[in-house]
Image (cartoon, rainbow, N blue to C red):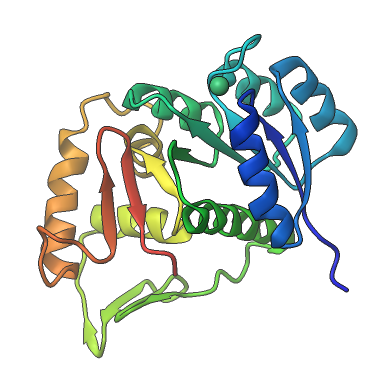
Amino acid sequence: MKPSFQILIIEDEENICEFMKRVLTAQDYKVYITHNGRDGLSAISSQCPDLIILDLGLPDIDGVDIIARVREWSSSPIIVVSARTHENDKVLALDAGADDYITKPFGTSELLARIRTSLRHSNRLNTDDSVAIRPYHALNLYIDFDRRLVSLGEQPIHLTPVEYKIVTCLAKNSGKVLTYSAIMQEVWGPYIEEDTKILRVNMANIRRKLEANPGAPQYIFTEIGVGYRMLDG
Ligand code: CA
């Protein structure tokens, strides 16, 4: 029997805890639950979970503060669950070190997909010796990072150096949402201004080259007010 991943849920709403526990246990995940931030932090240090599901609106500690504290010593993936519709909370959580987020109410398949993606990414980070990064492949799009080749089917795609950096940044994190500022810092460095216009202009050009219909993208999706997510490769 394969060892099961341990997932810690930090959430104060009992019915959501029960829903997630039922869904995750059925998938052979081992589930722990705490109902506030203080117990959550101590469970993280004592249990070392493989993944943390964190509600942003807890009774004692703000979820974003929890992320910042956990990231001082742990790289376990954190998926934020938020009832808040305010995009800025998601951005703050992601920039503090959360790996992804889902918004309540969410369905079973969305929850499981987010968990699988985050576990796969953290597993890859822990095992890859970063020399060989496997190519990205989804639908017709193929990216060979070693040879810096991008193609759609048989057709090579010519990207500018900046466009290529943006696409590879997203492709290496495919399935995960990346905030505008995370992408911009990766592509242009830490001193880039906050205005996202340069990124949006480049994205429009990228979509014209990659997408059959740039208005209804298949490969790179906009998470409104937050950033971009590339189709899982
Ligand atoms: Ca709550």
Q: Locate the N terminus and report the quarter of the image it occupies.
A: bottom right
Residue 21 vs residue 47, the one in the foreground: 21
Q: In the orientation shown, which residue stands out farthest toward the top?
A: 60
Residue 202 vs residue 222, the one in the foreground: 222
Task: State ligand 1's quadrant.
Answer: top right
Residue at position x 25%, y 38% in the image? 224
Q: Establish if 146 lies above or below 90.
A: below
**Is 224 on the left-hand or right-hand side of 230?**
left
Residue 147 position, x and y percent, is: 41, 76
Residue 173 position, x and y percent, is: 47, 55
Res 59 quadrant in image:
top right
Residue at position x 34%, y 27% in the image? 85
Q: Locate the C terminus and report the quarter of the image it occupies.
A: bottom left
Q: Establish if 42 lies above or below 232.
A: above
Residue at position x 36%, y 52% in the image? 229
Q: Establish if 48 lies above or below 191.
A: below
Residue at position x 12%, y 56% in the image? 205
